[in-house]
Every structure is written in structure tokens, then in C-alpha cells.
Image (cartoon, rainbow, N blue to C red):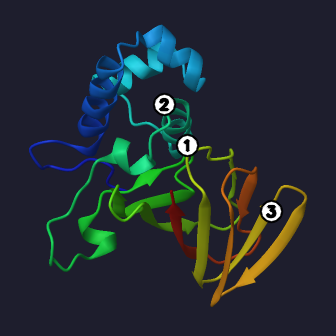
């Protein structure tokens, strides 16, 4: 799926530099970051050195533990007024099995207070998301396929075109229980 760019700096190196800069700015050791994120010290070190491609789940754990937006870790600002082909021009982040693909379309901007993701779920994919303490609302718009969304103990079937929003500080799970890919947009409002 082409996880490496040939640009001067790959997204993996960018994530590592950002993680190290935040850790140093807060005067945290790798042990301290490991404790607050639940990600091993070894993995954090590999991410910082650009030696490991972190999964979406790992990035969310780091962002949650450090109380950062996911966009801050991905740090992919685009120049203004530039048309972008999402699937060709933006480097995605994959889950452990390459079954969930996340594109950081509009990285977090403190002035707008949101970040925007384009997400593809392959058939049979289940992605459990921990509560986001630093996000107030999550807005989901299904644009292709049928997404099953579990919010705590409630389950919603969203057949495109469909939308839902919810408080992001609860456990939620995205599922594709169909034989076709699901595409949805996810906006995190802080």
C-alpha cells in the first residue's frame, strides 16, 4: 500500500520528531511517556527515531496520554488554496492489519478548534476507540457503504449518506460488517 514517501522527510520521521519535541518540551522521559500512554518505551524510542511505523491505535494512545490532537502528531499542514487528491497526495496511517486507513485531511488548528479525517474501513474491520478526553464532539458522515457505530451500549447502523455526532469522551467502536468497503469522514471538535 505504499507506506513510505520519497520526500525529504517521511511521515514516520515527522511523527518521531514531533513526539520527541513534545516529550522534551514537557521534560518527560521515555519511561514517563510510556506510563501515561500505555505504549512501551521501546516502541516510543523506535517511533522517535523513525524506525517504526506506528499504528492508528498507537498514535491515539500517544495523543490521548499526552493530551494532544492526533493532527499534532501527524503534523501535515497543507499550504492554503491548494487542491489535493486525498488518496494520492496525503500519506495515510494504517491500523495493524492495513484494514483501517486514515487520512489526516485538515490537521488540528487551534483557531478552528477541529481536525478532519477521511477514513476507509475494509470489510470485516472492527476498530475500538478509547474516549478522547481532549475532544468535545465527534461528527461522523458516512459517504460510502454501511458503518456500524457502537457508542457505549448503543449501536447505530449508518448507511450512506448518513451522519451522527456524539460526545467523544465515551468508548466507541467503528465496524464494517458488510462485504464492501466503508468510507466515512470524521471531524473532531475540541
- Residue for badge 3: 150
- Residue for badge 1: 96
Mark 3 vs mark 2: which is more N-terminal? 2
**Mark 2, secondary structure of its residue:** helix
Q: Residue furthest left?
A: 8
Q: Which mark is residue 155?
A: none
Q: Is 107 on the left-hand or right-hand side of 80?
A: right
Which numbered mark, 2 or 1, is in the foreground of this view?
A: 2
- Residue at 42% x, 60% y: name it: 113
Residue 49 location, quadrant = top left
Q: Residue furthest front?
A: 111
**Mark 1, secondary structure of its residue:** loop
**On screen, 158 above or below 3?**
below
Q: Is 105 on the left-hand or right-hand side of 178?
A: left
Q: Residue furthest bottom?
A: 161
Quarter that holds the N terminus: bottom left
- Residue at 50% x, 12% y: name it: 32
Which numbered mark, 3 or 1, is in the foreground of this view?
A: 3
Which numbered mark, 3 or 2, is in the foreground of this view?
A: 2
Image spot of residue 180 (x, y percent): 65, 78
Crowding at dot 2, Cα within 10 Å, few <14 / some 14-19 / many 20+, comes out as some
- Residue at 35% x, 21% y: name it: 23
**On screen, 71 above or below 102?**
above
Mark 2 vs mark 1: which is more N-terminal? 2
- Residue for badge 2: 66
Please tell me which residue lies in front, 185 or 179: 185
**Mark 3, secondary structure of its residue:** strand
Mark 3 vs mark 1: which is more N-terminal? 1
Residue 123 visible to the viewer: yes
Amino acid at each position: 500500500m505504499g507506506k513510505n514517501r520519497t520526500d525529504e522527510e517521511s511521515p514516520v520521521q515527522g511523527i518521531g520528531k514531533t513526539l520527541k519535541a513534545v516529550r522534551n518540551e514537557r521534560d518527560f522521559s521515555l519511561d514517563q511517556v510510556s506510563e501515561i500512554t500505555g505504549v512501551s518505551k521501546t516502541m516510543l524510542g523506535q517511533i522517535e527515531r523513525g524506525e517504526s511505523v506506528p499504528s492508528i491505535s498507537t498514535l491515539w494512545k500517544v495523543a490521548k496520554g499526552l493530551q494532544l490532537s492526533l493532527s499534532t502528531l501527524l503534523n501535515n499542514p497543507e499550504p492554503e488554496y491548494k487542491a489535493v487528491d486525498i488518496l494520492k497526495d496525503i500519506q495515510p496511517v494504517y491500523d495493524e492489519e492495513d484494514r483501517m486507513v486514515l487520512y489526516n485531511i485538515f490537521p488540528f488548528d487551534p483557531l478552528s478548534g477541529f481536525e478532519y479525517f477521511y477514513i476507509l474501513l475494509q470489510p470485516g474491520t472492527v476498530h475500538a476507540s478509547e474516549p478522547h478526553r481532549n475532544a468535545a464532539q465527534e461528527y461522523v458522515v458516512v459517504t460510502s457503504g454501511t458503518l456500524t457505530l457502537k457508542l457505549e451500549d448503543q449501536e447505530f447502523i449508518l448507511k450512506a449518506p448518513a451522519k451522527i455526532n456524539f460526545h467523544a469522551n465515551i468508548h466507541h467502536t467503528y465496524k464494517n460488517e458488510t462485504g464492501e468497503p466503508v468510507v466515512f469522514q470524521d471531524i473532531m471538535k475540541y
